């Protein structure tokens, strides 16, 4: 499977946000597109079987409202503004229409247990999308139910395991059940002493998240990861000459 696109450009975590621009907003995605960065997004299955692009399981932190994300319907998304900005919660289709293959999408399934056939519903939305995308999820229960579904039903889609605990998901059982194309590990958990050997055995690539400082950026380079997922931190190419 060829997925060099996932490794060739840094990945903007929830878009290229900050400085008055909200995370997981259409504005943050347009800013990432303008920079040429791949984009990491989070999707939740809603009550009407559509998908909201939003990180948290409830709206309290970002929208200031006590309501679960999965209880929403598509028309209601426009009622909820992100972090006091003009942007509202986007649907997945809105994001796909905006990105339109200009950069790659790294899509995190927040419901990794495949509740209510979430994988099939997500696949049905993505199957006609002409751009490049990959699926990732935290799969530390039930042998990675969601990612196993993607591996079985869509062999051309890169899939990856997210984890804060690299030692657990590098075990042979996880490779057998999921056969991930990449791992996305918390930068705080790296380096792992035998990571290079395991990467060679599994044939998988290594991403790290979330790079938010020069220290984390330098650590990622020392570890030799295949790509970084970053937010709020400005990469060297985005810094003004006098900002060094």
Image (cartoon, rainbow, N blue to C red):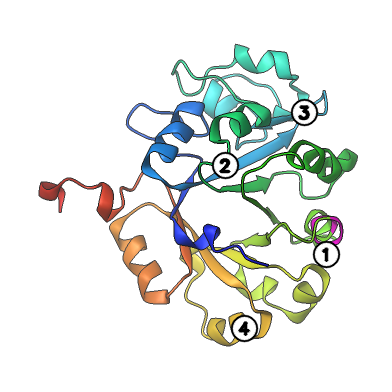
149 left or right, relative to 233: right
Which residue is label 3 attached to?
A: 50
Which residue is label 2 attached to?
A: 101
Q: Earlier in the sequence, mark 2 or mark 1?
A: 2
Q: Quadrant of residue 53?
A: top right
Q: Secondary structure at mark 2?
A: loop
Q: Quadrant of residue 18?
A: top left
Residue at horizontal 60 percent and vertical 37 percent from the top: 55
Q: Secondary structure at mark 4?
A: helix
- Image quadrant occupied by the N terminus: bottom right
Q: Earlier in the sequence, mark 3 or mark 4?
A: 3
Q: Secondary structure at mark 1?
A: loop
Residue at horizontal 46 percent and vertical 71 percent from the top: 225
CB atoms at circles 3 and 1 under 8 Å apart?
Answer: no
Q: Is label 3 or label 1 in front?
A: 3
What is the distance, in whole Å, between disc 2 and disc 3 at their CAs?
21 Å
Q: Earlier in the sequence, mark 3 or mark 1?
A: 3
Q: Earlier in the sequence, mark 2 or mark 3?
A: 3
CB atoms at circles 4 and 1 under 8 Å apart?
Answer: no
What is the distance, in whole Å, between disc 3 and disc 1 at their CAs?
26 Å
Q: Residues within 10 Å of mark 4 (few under 14, many from 20)?
A: some
Which residue is label 1 attached to?
A: 143
Residue at horizontal 45 percent and vertical 32 percent from the top: 30
Could you tell me residue 170's position as x and y percent?
67, 76
Residue at horizontal 69 percent and vertical 56 percent from the top: 138
CB atoms at circles 2 and 3 under 8 Å apart?
Answer: no
Which residue is label 4 attached to?
A: 198
What is the distance, in whole Å, between disc 4 and disc 1 at their CAs?
19 Å
Q: Start and end of the magenta stretch?
A: 149-153
CB atoms at circles 4 and 2 under 8 Å apart?
Answer: no
Q: Is label 4 or label 1 in front?
A: 4
What is the distance, in whole Å, between disc 3 and disc 4 at their CAs?
37 Å
């Amino acid at each position: 499977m060829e997925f060099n696109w996932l490794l060739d450009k840094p990945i903007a975590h929830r878009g290229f946000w900050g400085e008055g621009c909200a995370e997981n907003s259409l504005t943050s995605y347009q800013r990432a597109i303008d920079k040429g960065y791949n984009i990491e997004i989070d999707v939740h299955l809603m009550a009407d079987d559509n998908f909201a692009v939003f990180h948290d399981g409830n709206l309290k932190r970002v929208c200031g409202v006590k309501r679960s994300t999965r209880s929403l319907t598509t028309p209601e998304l426009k009622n909820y503004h992100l972090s006091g900005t003009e942007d509202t919660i986007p649907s997945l289709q809105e994001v796909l229409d905006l990105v339109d293959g200009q950069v790659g999408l790294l899509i995190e399934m927040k419901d990794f247990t495949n509740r209510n056939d979430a994988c099939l519903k997500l696949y049905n939305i993505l199957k006609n999308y002409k751009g490049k995308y990959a699926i990732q999820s935290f799969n530390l229960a039930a042998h990675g139910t969601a990612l196993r579904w993607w591996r079985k039903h869509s062999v051309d889609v890169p899939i990856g395991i997210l984890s804060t605990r690299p030692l657990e998901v590098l075990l042979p059982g996880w490779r057998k059940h999921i056969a991930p194309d990449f791992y996305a590990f918390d930068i705080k958990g790296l380096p792992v002493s035998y990571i290079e050997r395991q990467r060679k055995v599994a044939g998988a690539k290594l991403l790290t998240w979330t790079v938010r400082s020069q220290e984390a950026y330098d650590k990622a380079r020392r570890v030799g990861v295949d790509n970084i997922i970053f937010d709020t931190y400005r990469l060297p190419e985005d810094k003004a000459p006098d900002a060094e």
